[in-house]
Amino acid sequence: MAHSKRQLNRYEAMVAWVFILPTLLGLLIFRILPIFVTIGLSFTNWKMMGSFRWIGLLNYREMILFDPIFTLSMKNTVIFLLVSIPGSLSFALLVAMKLNEDIPGKTVFRTVYFIPYITTITAIASVFLWIFHSQGIVSRLLFYASEGDPPNLLLDKRYVIYVLAIIQIWRSMGYSLIIYLAALQNIPPELYESAEVDGARPLQKFWNITWPMLTPTTFFLIITEMISSFQAFDLVYAVTEGGPGTVSHVLAFYIYRVGFRLFRFGYASALSVVLFLIILVITLVQWRGQKRWVYE
Amino acid sequence: MSTIVQFAKDVRHNPTKLLTYFFLVIFSVIMILPFFWLVTSSFKAPDEIFTVPIKWLPESFGYLDNYERAFTSAPFGKFYYNSLKIATLRIIGVLFFSSLCAFSFAKLRFKGKNIIFLFILGTLMLPAQVTIIPTYYLMTKLSWVNTHLPLIVPLFFDGFVVFMLRQFFLTIPDSLLDAAKIDGAGYLYTFFTVMIPLSKPALASVSMLIFIWSWNDILGPLIFINSQHLLPISLGMNVFKQTHNTLYGPLFAGSVIAQIPLLIVFVAGQKYFQQGIATTGIKG
């Protein structure tokens, strides 16, 4: 009996491996091995065609010391994050709290706020080009009082990255909203009831119950939005193509340009490694943070 | 109807409620405004599109030239077909491989399970840009460049989908599976006759997410596709965007048409879809 039980277990394990194997191999070939190849290539001067050689850390040296576009891309990426994430999250939380109440038209609101998230960015990019154009609605409203022609916000190096961040808020907010809504529904109503018995005011209820109960969700959203913002390739590609000039380059876009327009695969690999390291650090912070900082 | 009555009562108690409701409406109008402009502009004649001050509505919705030109001056039908084909094949493949894999993680016992699961989760953090150059090289060696295969086959293997399906499979009670096992059913049989039918909501929400990702992908086609007739719609509609002379009318019409399948998928499966997203968020 014990013998057959062991055989049964072994059979179960074998079946499990057969089921896992295709995905495991696929991920190895298409996700894991390429990482190591990228790291290796980052020490070469490969340019797609012809031979290439090992150049040690020269790519990294060029990036840090002599590449103003890299510096600019990093700076833009950080501005983009710092504007879009707090914007998207606070906006989403405000709306989610409102939608968590019994108000008319809840489903309609939820749909309307979510639709930007599923939109094809190339389809809506031209609308934004026009909205932020010098004759477009936003410029005319913002520069209503100032003299002369209003600027084209997407062609002005002072504004373009902020405008992209605002479009990102518009686009990503629905996702955060859905997640906040689900989290709000998980807060036990008894907490609010007993707070009301104690005579708590709405703002007190928010800071003492809602906000602490939502920290895990907020933390999760900050991390996922950070990771997706670091990869914000399609938005930049569709709306500004990194321009005017190189003014609105972000890291993900710069990697694409160096790799597939300039065909400097070695240098693009080095840039990818930097992106990889940044995301690795964020992910590690998330894993540690989930255990430590977050109220459960 | 009762919500409205209740809301009216609340407002009488606390008039600020009406004010916040008003802001909610204003914000949602702002959210929807770009679409409104896109749709109305697709019916405008060229000289109506960029007028100052803004013309919110076209002269008439009977002006269909833009739609006609979208299909006659570009292979729009072909783009559509390509997008549908890529999304469908990708969904079939990823559901097949990921659900088997997730079933193992949720319901079977074997050594090293946790480590391998962590490994699969780890692949989630890898940005596409990090793997794109070696993948491109691999695709040239396989002669898959300028075919749809690079947009389909590598994406059969997706840690996120495995994770989502596993979370759902865990909620299915073992007793249901045991019942099938006692009858002498094999694992594959149990999987297809018990697990899959019970998991339709999860499979539906995963399919919708993948449909949307696939439909909206830009980086993939940008790198792997060179011929116009192979482009999916996300990139194909850029044919109207020329450096010096963008054909805005047909571009808007094309953009509207390109969003219709997304809207259909979203409206049809809104419930599953939002549940799917919410579960990934709560469990982190």
Image (tube, coloured by chain):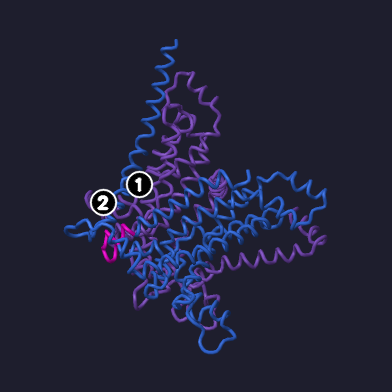
Task: Mark yes or no: residue B42 visible.
Answer: no
Question: Looking at the picture, which amino acid does disc 1 mark?
Answer: Arg
Q: Is residue B263 left or right of residue B150?
A: right
Q: Residue A70: where, in percent of width, then height?
A: 37, 66
Q: Where is mark 2, residue-wise? A: B139
Total number of numbered labels? Answer: 2
| Separation of residues labelled 2 and 1 (CA atoms) | 14 Å
Image: magenta residue range: A259-270
Task: Mark yes or no: residue A269 visible.
Answer: yes
Q: Residue B157: where, in percent of width, then height?
A: 38, 43
- Chain ID, mark 1: A
Q: Is residue B59 left or right of residue A63?
A: right
- Chain identifier, blue in the render: A
Q: Residues within 10 Å of mark 2 (few under 14, many from 20)?
A: some
Secondary structure beneath label 2 = helix
Residue A212, placed above or below residue A173:
above
- Chain ID, mark 2: B
The residue positioned 45% from the left and 52% from the top of the image is A281
- Chain identifier, purple in the render: B
Residue B186, placed above or below residue A200:
above
Q: Nearer the viewer, residue B172 or A245?
A: A245
Look at the image and tell me in which quarter the C terminus of chain A lies: top right
In front: label 2 or label 1: 1
The residue positioned 66% from the left and 53% from the top of the image is A211
Q: Nearer the viewer, residue B20 or A291?
A: A291
The residue positioned 79% from the left and 64% from the top of the image is B15
Q: Where is mark 1, residue-wise? A: A31
